[in-house]
Image (spheres, coloured by chain):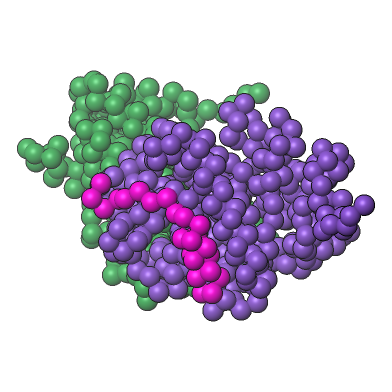
Chain colours: A green, B purple
Amino acid sequence: MEIDTPSLVITGSVRAPVLIAGHSNVNCFAESVLVDARDDFKVARSVLNGGYWDFVLDQSVGSVLVFVWNGNQFNSRFLFRPDPDFRLWRETPETTPRSSVLVPEELVRAWVRPSLARLRFLIRSALEGDRRVVILGTPPPKSEEWVAAALPRETVFVEKAKELGFVGGSHPPISRLSFRLALWEILQEEMHRVAWESGARFLAVSEEARDRSGALRPEMCSLDVTHANAQYARMMMTKILTVLVDEDWHG
Amino acid sequence: MASHPYGKQPRKSFWSRAVANEWNPKELVTSSMLRSGDRVVSAGSCFASNMVPYIEEWGLTYVRTEEPHPAFPEMDENLGYRSFSAAYGNIYTARQLLQLLRRATRSFAPLVDRWHVEEFVVDPFRPGLRYPARSDEEFNFLQQQHFDAVVKAFQTATVLVFTLGLTEAWVDPRDGSTFPSCPGTVAGEFDPLVHHFANFSVDDTVDDLHAFIRELREVNANVRIILTVSPVPLVATATDNHVLVATTYSKSVLRVAADTVASAEASVSYFPAYEIVTGPQATVDFFEKDRRSVTKAAVEVVMDALKESSAIDTESIDVAGSWPRGQAAKGVLPTETAGLQARLSSAVAEAECDEALLES
């Protein structure tokens, strides 16, 4: 069987001191590098290419390697409200249906940890060479309104809705924001743990990326269900640069 | 020939006719156990979990009020917390059962109801839970949910099957809190000042069972109760006796207590699983090579006897969806573990009983 492998591409100057690499959330960074013609960042895309991580390690020798790791683990299973519903204790009580089952947070953490196992391995590989390694937080969830409006454009979720018996553009109820925020926070904490245990630096998403409800601000949303846009990328790149001049950056 | 009381006894009263010859375990049961339409709740030692798939196969309802959430089908649970009606795990002693009910109904609040272990908050009465709380607040929420599930199970049942397993236990002498396992074996730390050994007597066990039944009837007036004694020997004893001597003592106490309570209480029966598996008539293949683990062959005979002694309509049973036999209480380690989970090693996950961890 022939597999159409995406070719490996660096967006930006190959001499840029910071390489951003990872899954689909790197796309907004590539867009910003292109639009703003930046020479301080480069972005490696095409994570689906089998040689991607070898390529990334090769391209990041002597520079800063920023991992943007997945971020959609929970969306793939819990963008639609689970049936039966469940809740996590850290959700704000006023938005949480008390009738739903409380699931231990540790169960959710244990579920997500395998998705970070390869990240842990890659950090170790990166740190064995001459690189500084940063794990970047991933974009927070979007509001229910935004998700509902963007859903018809998302083939993956439209198909998933069909599998669940929803046709003609209808879809299951979208999970409440407080639930998705709790899942997102857990993911960020687990990535922070991986970074800390591996000797890398974790950079959390800036508070300015979030609105009063905690969701990704509309002006930082891409048009789809989950990803951020170039404005978000600019903000996070500013944060990365701030950290790089911090002498105690490993702290 | 002089007449005497034995002359009027039926065939089953004579060893030569009922055991040495024409052995039929179904004759051991003297009253009807389960009925069509029953909603069964069970609790007890590891052996008790064996009955669950059979109950469902017979078309009865096995009450489950607290199960792992189906959104995480790949995430398993440890040590039988998914083997019973609610996630209380193995309940070895009558005292533990009584305290479970009292804790769930808030008539007993242990002096120490949690252990802080690394970043986790561990339930001393369910120490092997694979996914413990990570904060006191979360612990409170999860514990309340567990207690609600326990009460709901007890309220829903038409029949409760309790398998008595042990007389030996570890207790906190300050308030009598009784643990399912010795602190320090599954989780927590053993402290000789607050963790004392107890070996419950017949009177202790009878009193605890009477108290449990009395208080259970306050939440479910009509529930029937079936008592059994686990045929599984002790893994280890904390007495000075040989483990075989300790086992004989323990099982004897439990057997007498079960009979005493069944004779005294209305709607309480004794089911002789212990006799079927351990009696001299039992074949060598009723125990594994370790002469402790009960084999599937033995369980089949026990469950056949239970079925035969029950008034169940098995004509229109759809067995699809029932639990596969032999799967009860098995755990599977996730691909990656951390912290406390790492210490709850594969030995923990694979053990059907937290009691088995006394050897680790």
Q: Residue A208's x, y, as percent?
A: 23, 60
Relative placement, left or right, of B160 versus A118 is right
Give the camera-side residue of B205 and A181. B205
Q: Residue at x 24, y 25 (%)?
A: A127
Question: Can see residue A130?
Answer: yes
Specify the quadrant that holds the C terminus of chain A: top left
Specify the quadrant that holds the N terminus of chain A: top right
Give the camera-side residue of B128 and B338. B128
B194 within the magenta span: yes
Give the camera-side residue of B28 and A107. B28
In the rendered view, tell whether residue A164 sits above or below residue B39. above
Q: Quadrant of residue A24?
A: top left
Q: Residue at x 8, y 39 (%)?
A: A248
B54 within the magenta span: no
Relative placement, left or right, of B210 versus A70 is right
Total tally of numbered discs in the picture: 0
In the rendered view, tell whether residue B177 sits above or below residue B287. below
Part of the protein shown in magenta: B192-215
Q: Residue at x 7, y 37 (%)?
A: A247
Q: Residue at x 82, y 58 (%)?
A: B5
Q: Residue B307's x, y, as percent?
A: 79, 54
In the rendered view, tell whether residue A55 sits above or below residue B156. above
Q: Residue B99's x, y, as percent?
A: 44, 64
Relative placement, left or right, of B243 versus B231 is left
Give the camera-side residue of A70 and B126. B126
Question: Can see residue B57?
Answer: no
Q: Residue A73's x, y, as percent?
A: 45, 47
Q: Residue furthest left?
A: A247
